[in-house]
Amino acid sequence: MFETLSDKLSGSLRKVRGRGRLTEDNVSQTLNEVKMALLEADVNFRVVKAFLRSVKVRAVGEEVQGSLTPGQQFIKIVNEELTEMMGGANSGLMEPEAAPLITMMVGLQGSGKTSSAGKLARLYQSKGKRPYLIPADIYRPAAIQQLQVLADTLGISCYPSRTEQNLLEIVQKGLETAKQEEADVVFIDTAGRLHIDEELMEELRRIKTFVAPHEILFVADAMTGQEAVSVAKGFNDLLDITGVILTKMDGDARGGAALSIRAITQKPIKFIAVGEKLENLEAFYPERIASRILGMGDMLSLIEKVEDSFSEREALQMQKKILSNEFTLEDFRDQLRSMRKMGSMKDVIGMLPGMSASSMKDANIDNKKLLHIDAIISSMTIKERKNHNLMNGSRRLRIAKGSGTTVSEINRLLKQFIQMRKMMQKLSKVSNPGKAMRMMQDMMPN
């Protein structure tokens, strides 16, 4: 996500980072490079123009020239203006006075409306809410079944729509059932088309008038770039949407849609989908995304991911084992399984300050390797997992055959595990956060 843009912007801003004095020529030259980076990232040219104008006004004024660190102050301005371009702050779904919160999902066919409805339901379920799904797409083959399968996977209620039913009847009866079941939030999955047409918009207008939803979320495929921005404007002009969900953000290295869509529609991006799994939906925080684009890391998002994957009780137990040198291969496997829940390791490491896309270009970070390690450890006996010192030649050969790997891979894993145990013990005794961070980065290549 944003890899290409982050690489180019970080390179341009690196030239001014340490400067003790900035002239108008310096600023103009840097902004010209920033402009090219944004346009190549498929950001709308009107948005780029307004962004550069705002940065230049602040950069050539007293705010930078009077600063003790002009280079750093200039980057701070770029960061703030980038954040403002994307909406300034996170804007979640509203909380109505009386439940349920009714949310309409709209967008073109294939944008990811149905899966986004499931992901939102899962997100609210994890917050202790009772979500309810209403399949209102009676045209696309298997659309109703898809939403019902997602509901079954989550163990939540879904209205049993049928394609021969009247659309407004589905919505009416679905809402009645949701209220009877005391649902907290209702997601209505509407039909889409391959393009905006009068028939589609009239149908959506009828549902909006009939339901009076609290939220109308436009779901857009981020991979379509400027096309997503144009379509969002069309839906907003006709339906007055309340927010946007961008899907397939994990596959969009440019990020033009995310940087343009709010500026054009004046409606906030509320969520982004960063994978196909139900848990791969994140709240959109403009300030965190701006920080990530500029290579400054995103520690808040990283902390939230860790908190979602590791309970406080588990963390305390693990800390105790590390301090007493009782951390075993079985503990290591459990930690790897929890780490896999956090998503791509490359994305996770990219949230650390200084670990930008360019700094990880040559890094050999492959999530499949975690599966190989899991297979190796799972092929060991319980005694072997709890005491790695038992590993002799015959045991290593047996484990290699059982896991479909080689003895050299077993040897490499054991060596890295022993090194990691030593490093973890050292880290647990370090009180200086800066020193701990440097030690963690030293561990990264392994």
Image (spheres, grey):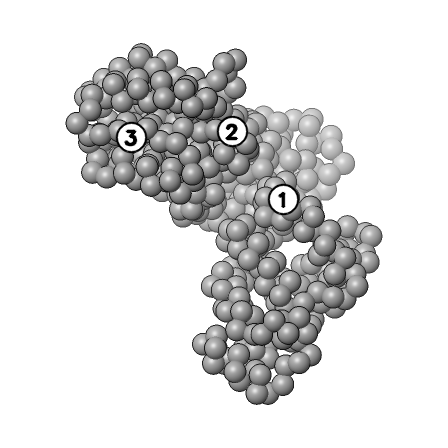
* Residue position for label 1: 307
Vertical relation: 37 (above or below) 401: above
The image's mark for residue 129 is 2
Mark 3 residue type: Pro
User: Is disc 3 surrounded by few (<14), some (14 to 19) or many (20+) residues within 10 Å?
Assistant: some
Mark 2 residue type: Lys
Q: Which quarter of the figure has residue 150?
A: top left
| N-terminal-most mark, 2 or 3 | 2
Which residue is depicted at the point 64% across and 35% down? 76
| Residue 120 spot, x, y in % from top left | 44, 33
| N-terminal-most mark, 3 or 1 | 3
* Residue position for label 3: 160
**Which-is-in-front pick, marks 3 and 1?**
3
| Label 1–label 2 contact, CB within 8 A | no
**Which-is-in-front pick, marks 1 and 2?**
2
Q: Which quarter of the figure has residue 391?
A: bottom right
Which residue is depicted at the point 47% across and 39% down? 281
Say which element carries label 1.
Answer: helix
> Is 344 on the left-hand or right-hand side of 68?
left
| Label 2–label 3 contact, CB within 8 A | no
Mark 1 residue type: Glu
Residue 51 visible in the snapshot: no
**Which-is-in-front pick, marks 2 and 3?**
3
User: Is disc 1 surrounded by few (<14), some (14 to 19) or many (20+) residues within 10 Å?
Assistant: few
